[in-house]
Image: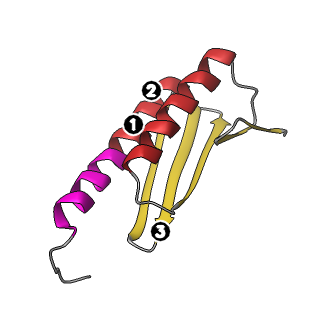
């Protein structure tokens, strides 16, 4: 299996269309805008026998944010990963500056 890396997502087991690459880049950019500064971001999409699975991982001094999902369609998978990350960032923004108990 070959790996194809855009500027941001790593594609495993398939070669993404130009449209998918552009879409991934847009979503990655939106995640970057919401993520803590100086964070490390990793995004993967793999083709499976049932469709696609993917993950988004953001690590920073402020915390670690992770999203994993599976979908029959690659674009829908990207949407799901973005929504999961956006919810975590929203929660993080709400709790910044407020002391809270870590679990």
Question: Mark 1 against mark 3, which lies toward the viewer?
Answer: 3
Give the Cα separation between the discs numbered 3 and 2.
Answer: 27 Å
Determine whether 103 is above or below 11 in the image.
below
Image position of 37 (left or right of 19): left
* Disc 2, SS: helix
Q: Quadrant of the C terminus?
A: bottom left
- In the picture of the structure, the residue carrying the numbered disc 2 is 76
Q: CA distance from mark 1 to mark 3?
A: 22 Å
Give the residue at x 19% y 72%: 97
51 to the left or right of 100: right
Write the residue at 61% across / 16% down: 19
Q: Are marks 2 and 1 in contact (CB under 8 Å)?
A: yes
Task: Decide which of 100, 70 is in the foreground and name it.
Answer: 100
- For the record, the magenta segment spans 85-96
Task: Give the main secondary structure, helix, strand or loop, of the magenta stretch.
Answer: helix
Dot placed on the residue nearer the N-terminal end, 1 or 3: 3
Classify mark 3: helix, strand or loop: strand
Q: Residue at x 68, y 38 (%)?
A: 7
Bin the neighbour count of mark 2 within 10 Å (Cα to Cα): few under 14, some 14-19, many 20 and up: some
Image x and y of residue 58, in percent:
49, 59
Does residue 89 belong to the magenta stretch?
yes
Numbered badge on residue 80: 1
Q: Position of residue 78 (x, y in %)?
A: 48, 33
Q: Residue furthest right?
A: 2
Q: Nearer the viewer, mark 3 or mark 2?
A: 3
As drawn, 7 above or below 97? above
Which label belongs to residue 8?
none
Q: Is residue 73 visible?
A: no
Q: Earlier in the sequence, mark 3 or mark 2?
A: 3
Residue occupied by mark 3? 60
């Amino acid at each position: 299996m070959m790996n194809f890396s855009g500027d941001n997502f790593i594609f495993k087991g398939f070669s993404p269309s130009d449209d998918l690459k552009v879409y991934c880049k847009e979503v990655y950019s939106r995640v970057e805008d919401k993520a803590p500064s100086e964070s490390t971001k990793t995004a993967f999409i793999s083709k499976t026998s049932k469709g696609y699975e993917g993950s988004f991982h953001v690590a920073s001094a402020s915390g670690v944010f992770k999203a994993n999902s599976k979908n029959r369609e690659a674009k829908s998978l990207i949407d799901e990963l973005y929504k999961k990350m956006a919810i975590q960032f929203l929660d993080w923004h709400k709790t910044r500056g407020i002391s809270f108990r870590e679990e």
